[in-house]
Amino acid sequence: MTLSRKPNYFLFLTPALAIFVFVVVFPFFRGAFISLTSWDGIARGMKFVGFDNYKTIFTTDTILTPLSNSLVFTSITLVCDNILGLVLALLLAEATRRNALFRVVFFLPFIISLVVSSYMWTYLYSSVLYPVFGLKNPLGNQATSNFGVAMISVWRNTGYCMLIYLAGLKSIPDSLYESAVVEGAGALARFRKITLPLLVPSLSINLTLILAWGLKEFDTVMVATGGGPGRSSMSMAFYVYKTTFVWNKAGYGQAIAVVMMLLIVAVSSAVAKALRSREVEL
């Protein structure tokens, strides 16, 4: 490619770049500026307070409950989504009509909106779980509300993880398994020595995405529990929303949002880097 033609190629990126700047870059810097003020989200004027909002975040314990809830929620979804997704992928790896049907069934929840999924499971928890099975609604108990919300997310995202693992399984040459069988390797040995190492790229995708989705979970919490009972299921993202728009502390809310974004970027990048170093190239 000659240097004279490079500007023409960059022109094709201009629309996407403009949207990215308008939707992501500008709001981030605007929010970073607001985080340095005591703005209530309504008044026209903004009083500059420097890093006072950030000092408040790290010197008070009000943020510990939402942070803890987000970490627990993320841990549950991270483990359950990947284990269940991998199990389903292994069970449905063979290309048959029945398996194709089950793949669609298990992936279908992912295309349902978060709001609809949350309303549906709120109804199932309250109107089916107890009347039919005699079990208490987990969303109504402080000890189990966060777990109940996490299960909604697991139900929705497991099919996505399954699809990624299926793609990874399809990329593994059959000759590797045939050679292992000739060498006398059993099913468990083949899974441990061939399947798992070659699925690390798929695992990297699923872990990174589920980790980021879990740390910024908002929709399910807002619809299913509203952060309650009390603050037992309040996530970091929902805490930012409440602080900014309900409690009218936009400056402080933006400071929390900035810290949350940096946390997500740092953790996701570290996990992705660690997993990339273990990827096996065919």
Image (tube, rainbow, N blue to C red):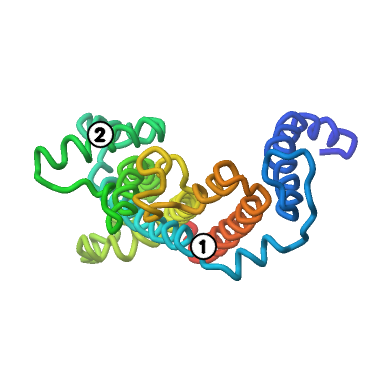
Q: Residue at x 21, y 66 (%)?
A: 184
Q: Earlier in the sequence, mark 1 or mark 2?
A: 1
Relative to 215, residue 107 above or below: above
Q: Amino acid at mark 1?
A: Thr
Residue toward you, 151 or 221? 221
Q: Amino acid at mark 2?
A: Tyr
Q: Looking at the picture, how far across and down is residue 14, in whole percent?
A: 77, 31
- Horizontal arrangement in the rendering, residue 280 relative to residue 20 (left or right): left
Q: Looking at the picture, how far across and down is residue 142, in whole percent?
A: 30, 56
- Horizontal arrangement in the rendering, residue 194 relative to residue 57 (left or right): left
Residue toward you, 167 or 142? 142
Q: Label 1 crowding class (10 Å Cα cut-off): few <14, some 14-19, many 20+?
A: few
Label 1 with label 2: CB-CB less than 8 Å: no
Using the numbered discs, state the Cα–Cα distance from disc 1 to disc 2 in whole angstroms. Answer: 31 Å
The quarter in which the N terminus is drawn is top right
Q: Residue at x 50, y 53 (%)?
A: 236
Label 2: element kind = helix
Q: Which residue is situated farthest in the right direction here?
A: 4
Residue toward you, 73 or 159? 73
- Does residue 79 show up? yes
Q: Which residue is mark 1?
A: 62
Q: Residue at x 80, y 30 (%)?
A: 11
Q: Which residue is mark 2?
A: 123
Q: Label 2 crowding class (10 Å Cα cut-off): few <14, some 14-19, many 20+?
A: some
Q: Looking at the picture, how far across and down is residue 214, in whole percent?
A: 45, 51
Q: How many marks?
A: 2
Label 1: element kind = loop
Q: Residue at x 37, y 49 (%)?
A: 228
